[in-house]
Structure formats: C-alpha cells, structure tokens
Amino acid sequence: MHIAIAGNIGAGKTTLTKMLAKRYGWKAHFEPVDNNPYLEDYYKDMKRWAFNLQIYFLNKRFCDVVEISKSNDTIVQDRTIFEDARIFAPNLHEMGLMSDRDFNNYSHLFDLMMSLVKIPDLLIYIRCSIPRLIDHIQQRGREYEQAMRIDYLKGLNRRYEDWIKDYKGHLIIVDGDTTDFQDNPKDFKRITDMIDDRLFGLFPIDDK
C-alpha cells in the first residue's frame, strides 16, 4: 500500500512521515533534500536552476514510484511526483522562472511517466497558511531557504489548493495551523484515528 504526505515547503511532511512510519511500522520514503546537488544553487538563482532542479526531483520521484509499485510493504512517502508536476513546475513557469520550452519539455516527460504509474492509495495533505510555513522554515534553519520569496510560497499554496480541490483519490486533510502533531499526542492521535478509519474502517480502502 502507498500512503503519501503532501504539502507546501515547511508544512511538516517529513516530520509526519517519520511519525507515521514509527507508529505503524511502515517503510518511509523521504524527499531527496540533503543530498540534492541543485538545491543550494537553485535558491541563489532560481531562474538559472529551476529546470535542472525539477528534472532532478522528477527523476528521483519516478524511481520511488516504480520501487513502491513493486513492493509488498506499506510505504509512506514524503511528497508525491504529482506535486512536482502540478504545483512546483507550473508555479515556476508562471513566475517566469522556467521558460516555455523547458516547461513544455518537462510536462511531456511527466505525462509519459504518468502513463506508467497510479495515484497513492491514500493521500494526506497538510494545509498551512503562509505565516505558519515561514515559521517552520525559520525554525529548521536551512540556510538556503532563508532567502525564499514570499510570492513563491503564495503561488505554491494557491496551486496546492487548486490541486486538492479536484483530487480524485482517497484523501485526508490536516489543518497544519491548528494541529501540532509533533508535540501534542492528542493532535497526532486525531490524525491516526482518521487513517485507521480509512484503512481499517467499515469500508476500508482495500475494498474499493
């Protein structure tokens, strides 16, 4: 089974992924951030490195999806391939940080990949306001993120909401502004109760 955690930069995806993997004994797949050879250059010059970064993420995410599809384990994944193509790349294109040529090339590659994969069995979306995202980004202290543009985060948030509004698969939405799942056990239990209901309730996902 494939469980995926979605949300904007700083929403808490990695934290929730780790907590769910520990709680359920699931195998975790994390977003390739710390060893990403493009990320630091990207935040210094987004227009120059946008296409390179998105191709890197697309490649890594597609490899993950292929591996997940072949696994008999339940896997919880930090960010999906759909977020790269439906949110991050279009946002960069709209901001003028990715050319028409590069965006069209990227989109055609993504469409080909999508003909070979399926959506997650369950998607958990962490919805956060911009102030909350900024607070989390500042707290974790990644130097290359500190100069991130506010309009960049706002554009991503808008695209996330548009994507979730039309999402067709099984979905749980977590309010990241009012839910402190990291430090409040009751908040985390509310999330796991929702997951248990979807996975093991009267009409579990496996019976769809």
Image (cartoon, rainbow, N blue to C red):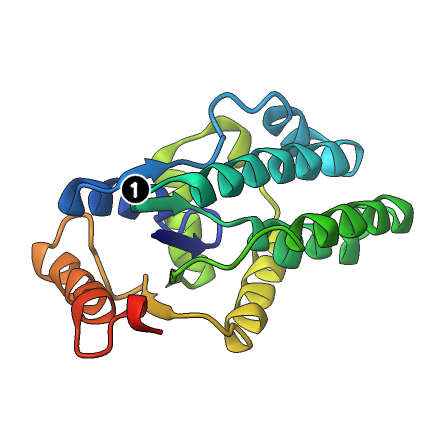
Q: Is residue 156 left or right of residue 71?
A: right
All told, the count of numbered labels is 1
Q: Is residue 147 visible?
A: no
Tell me if I can see residue 82 in this picture.
Answer: yes
Q: Secondary structure at mark 1?
A: loop
Give amino acid for label 1. Answer: Asp
Residue denoted by label 1: 73
Q: Position of residue 120 (x, y in %)?
A: 44, 57
Give the side of residue 18 with respect to residue 160, left or right: left
Camera-side residue of 173 and 146: 173
Q: Residue furthest left?
A: 186
Q: Is residue 82 placed above or below 199 in the rendered structure?
A: above
Q: Position of residue 10 (x, y in %)?
A: 42, 47
Q: x and y percent of residue 92 in the render?
A: 72, 50
Which residue is more in the foreground, 13 or 170? 170
Which residue sits at x=25%, y=70%? 198
| Mark 1 burial class by Cα count in 10 Å: few <14, some 14-19, many 20+ | few
Q: Which corner quadrant of the image does residue 127 belong to? A: bottom left
The residue that appears at 79% across and 32% down in the rendered structure is: 48
Q: What x and y, as percent, mark residue 202?
A: 17, 79
Position of the C terminus, as image quadrant, is bottom left
Relative to the observer, which residue lies in front, 167 or 161? 167
- Image point 44% across, 49% down: which residue? 134
